[in-house]
Image (cartoon, rainbow, N blue to C red):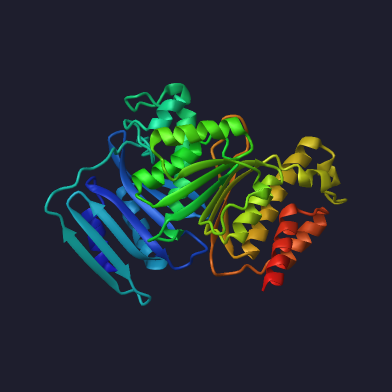
Amino acid sequence: MEELRLVLQDIMNIDLIQVTMSGARNPDGCVKIKMRPMLRRDQVYFQAEEFRNNQVFHQNLETDQAAAYVMEKMEHHFKQLQAETKRENVNVLVSKKGRVNVKRQRLKQAKEQGDLSHNRKKQYVLPEGTAVPFLVDLGVMTREGAVVKSKYDKYRQINRFLEFIRDVLPELPKGRQLTILDFGCGKSYLTFAMYYYLKELEGYDIRIIGLDLKKEVIDRCNQLSRQYGYDKLDFLTGDIADYEGVSEVDMVVTLHACDTATDFALAKAVRWNAKVILSVPCCQHELNGQIRSDVLEPLFRYGIIKERIAALATDALRAELLEQQGYRVQMLEFIDMEHTPKNLLIRAVKTRKMEDSRQRYEACRDFLGVHPSLERLLCEQSEVKGKIK
């Protein structure tokens, strides 16, 4: 590891842009680390971001500490290191036997460095300074691209949602048109954001269908879609449970579909073999009326506590059922929407691995005395599929 130590002596200074350590030897632990320099009270520190279990942990290190930290991580935890400095790129590979391979590429022209302050400005998917038509019409941006101060929360919500989509782009098929369904789209500012980001910024060939029960809202959304020239963004009036307009879907989005409407959307997504599901459930009443447990009775005596436990149990059981269908599921915190405190997002990505968790699921379900709609819907779909075969 001596060669790596010498590299770190050269690059761990104010000219460093970023170090990324990846290729975790133990995928159940920390999966990636990013490190960058920062200035605080005119002293150089290095901020390490550790990514583990869908969370990010930060720590600030002095130069000597930072170099020792990187050495320890590369010796025991990671296989690859990539470093960008103002003057060169460095790639380090560490074999299973500890052999270090270093490649250094000198740049013909020095790179510009970003803000080194501790509280540097966040880089949003839809950056400030560039006017986006639907954000202007929503009153979130001015015609010059400045974010309206009173609408900054909504601006952050939109960008947070697009970050979730950006993370799953590698999971989506390439080389053909993608079909995306947004159930319960409402006024559709996130639907417009999704279309703008994927089509205009990322260049994907996409078709997005928004579905909602309110005809006047749907009419307005279609009007705006035509106004912006979004020729593959259509809005339909209809119910999630009855919609049969497509046979295959690549991504299903359901934000704040009320109570069991979320279950119908998830079941449809599974039936369509959707590669990605993004769901922010809302108003989980069903299990609140069913849940029974003598052991947990001291908790269920209090209505507000029972309601919250039932809501969390609903989404946890939904996640278990999706994993049984071959999805990798994450529970992520979503910034509160404008008129609701619901902020839990279920992100599910289709994989080939089927999670064998039926016994675990049934034990939890029976302990709580509940009968989730999603389980019934998936069973019905499975029976129909079996008859067709």
Relative image position of residue 221 (x, y in whole percent): 51, 34
- Residue 367 lies, with reference to residue 230, above or below; the image says below
Residue 100 drawn at (x, y percent)? 29, 71
- Which residue reaches farthest right? 294
In the rendered image, the vertical position of residue 211 relative to residue 179, given as above or below:
above
Using the image as rendered, state which of residue 239 and residue 267 is in the foreground.
Answer: 239
Nearer-the-camera pick, 27 or 270: 270
Q: Residue at x 76, y 53 (%)?
A: 372
Quadrant of residue 7 in the image? bottom left
Q: Position of residue 349 (x, y in %)?
A: 53, 59
Is 146 placed above or below 28 here? above
Where residue 122 sits in the image (x, y, percent)? 38, 37
Lateral position of residue 28 relative to residue 287, left or right: left
Q: Is residue 341 left or right of residue 204?
A: right
Name the quarter where the N terminus is drawn.
bottom left
Taking the view exactly as shown, the residue that stands out farthest to the bottom is 97
Q: Quadrant of residue 163?
A: top left
Q: Residue at x 25, y 49 (%)?
A: 16
Residue at 27% from the left image edge and 35% from the top image edge: 42
Query: Is 110 situated above or below 126?
Result: below
Residue 337 seen in this snapshot: no
Q: Quadrant of the C terminus?
A: bottom right
Count of marks, rendered view: 0
Residue 18 visible at all: yes
In the current view of this chain or complex, which residue is farthest to the left? 108
